[in-house]
Structures are given as structure tokens and as C-alpha cells.
Amino acid sequence: MTIAAKLSLCHAPVTRRSLTPIKPLRPSSFSSSTLQWKLIKPNLTLKSHNFRVSASSSMKIEATESSSRTSFLDRRESGFLHFVKYHGLGNDFILVDNRDSSEPKVSPEHAVKLCDRNFGIGADGVIFAMPGINGTDYAMRIFNSDGSEPEMCGNGVRCFARFIAELESLHGNHSFTIHTGAGLIVPEIQDDGKVKVDMGEPVLKASEVPTRLPANKDQSVVKSELDVDGVPWLVTCVSMGNPHCVTFGTKGGQNFQVDALKLAEIGPKFEHHAMFPARTNTEFVEIISPSHLKMRVWERGAGATLACGTWCLCRGGCSSS
Ligand SMILES: N[C@@H](CCC[C@H](N)C(=O)O)C(=O)O
């Protein structure tokens, strides 16, 4: 789903972090579709210390026709930063057209405020479509809702690809190159509008995830014990450019049910565990059947979210190990 609106804010200088060199990635993919919506008649202004959000007080929302989708993005009132809201499976993002600058138009501190679900727009993160680096067509940067900057975001990159198609009026099958903190990503927009992304192979080497848990299989951490408040969880550590800790439950535990989990309590204990020097995303997984898993995620820097794209690839890493 896409919601378009506008906001004005004082542009604070943002310190750019250097991105890692582009690494070629090998193929693996996932895809999904998005719906298009447009927020109309902005007439409510929320003021805070240093930014302002305009939105519709009546929240009249109408579906846009694919033929007239560019109208909102064409309106460029000065002093306002335009954004569009997209989601991938409920993992939602504020997308900002940053193609004219290599500095994000929103600082990490502002991103925190914009992502606030009560006092801001509400999102899991803010994504910037930026000029390409090292010969790529575009660069993607993202701030989590806590203002931290992840290397990569699977659902985010799919939203990014649809956003670029919207901005550049691309129709039909298209592919382009995106520089991310996790290397080169090449999404393919298919004829039906779905986005297919080559996200590379999961990395299991402990030092590269990174995790301080001792490797127990081919330099990897596979079904190892992680002590969380005295409870031994069995975890497998994987990187998809960003760190993930996947668990199917505790040692000796039976019938792990993710719905019974107090996610907001246990999630931060994994995220900030001393064994994860770069913090971690954690996926709690219940096996429903050999072909059906149920997963709840606690994302680094964003907390409980409805979905996680990079996890989909971790799943492959965990099952193959
Ligand atoms: N939701 C994402 C992951 C976003 C980044 C994550 N919060 C992190 O800090 O690594 C996805 O779809 O992959």
C-alpha cells in the first residue's frame, strides 16, 4: 500500500556514514505486490519542535488509477518534503525522493519522530532514494525507527524499487542497480508490478554475522545455546548483510508457540545481548508443519514488525544448516 502526503521540516545537516564497497551477490529471490493509495486534501498540521507534518484530518483516502499515479509526486511546494508511504507485507516505510542529494533530507533524530505511530506519520523506518555510487543507478539508505542505520532491508528494497518505478514513470519489466550498505542489489520489476530481488546468499560465518557466540559448525553458530536471563535458547546466527538470530525455542522446550511469547519483553534482551556486538534482528519460529512455519520478529532498531524480508533468506540458511 502506498500513501502519499507531504511534510515540512528544518533540514538539519546529517553526517554521512561511509557505505561498504559493492560486493557482487549471488541469486536468491522473493517477491510480493503492493497496492496504491493516495492521501488527498492535506489540511491538518502537526507541529513539533523542528518539523511539521501535514495530513488529511478527514483521512479521506482514495485508490489511485495506475494511469494517474504521478500527480501527487509532481506537486513540489517549496518548504515541504514530500514522502510516500509503502509497505511490504505490513513492514512499512516512509520513502523520500533524495535523488538530488547524497545527504539524507531527514536526520536520524527526525526519522525517529516521523516513525512515531502516535505523534508522527508512523513507520518501521525511513528510506531514501539517492544518487548511485560506484556506477550504480541508485543508492538506498534507511534509518530504522530508532534512528539507527541498517545495512540492508529486504522489504524496504522492494518498496524502493516500486518507488523508483513511480518516480521515473517506468512501466513493464525493468531492472536497475542499487548500492546498499550490504552491497549491490538488483531488483527486477516484473510485468505484473511485483518486485523480485536478488539478495545473495546467507552468510553464517560467526565473525561476519557478527556474533561472539563460539562457532560450533564450519565457523558458524548453529543451534547454539544463548543464555537469556538464565534460559538457554537454541539459536542460529545468520547475516543477510544485516544480523539475524533465528530460534526455534529453548533447549529441551516442547511445542514452542510464538503467540504465547511476550515479544516486547524478550525481544530487546536478544537485540542488546552481549553476544551480538552490532545488536541483532531476532526471529522466533514455530514449526506448524514441514511446509509451514509461523514467525514473529523483533527487529533491531524497530522492535516488533509485521514482516522481515531479509529473514526469508535466513530461513534458507537455517534449514540448509
Ligand atoms: N524489515 C527489514 C529489516 C530492516 C532492518 C533491520 N531493522 C536492521 O536493523 O537490520 C527487512 O525486511 O529485511
Image: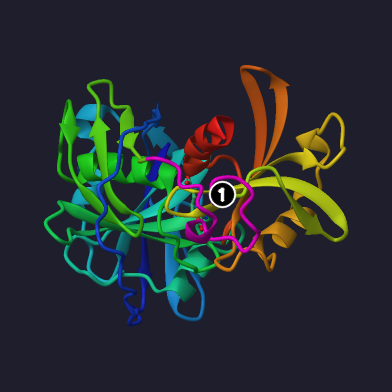
Asked whether 253 or 31 is in front, the reply is: 253
* Residue 208 covered by magenta stretch: yes
Part of the protein shown in magenta? 201-220
Is residue 86 visible in the rendered image? The answer is: no
Image quadrant containing the C terminus: top right
Image quadrant containing the N terminus: top left
* Residue 114 covered by magenta stretch: no
Q: Position of residue 50 (x, y in %)?
A: 45, 80
What residue is drawn where x is 85% and y is 61%? 229
Q: Position of residue 128 (x, y in %)?
A: 32, 59
- Name the magenta segment's main secondary structure: loop
Q: Is residue 122 left or right of residue 82?
A: right
User: Pointer 1: residues within 10 angstroms few (<14), some, or many (20+)?
Assistant: many
What residue is drawn where x is 66% and y is 64%? 275
Asked whether 319 or 70 is in front, the reply is: 319
User: Dot 1 corresponds to which residue?
Assistant: 220
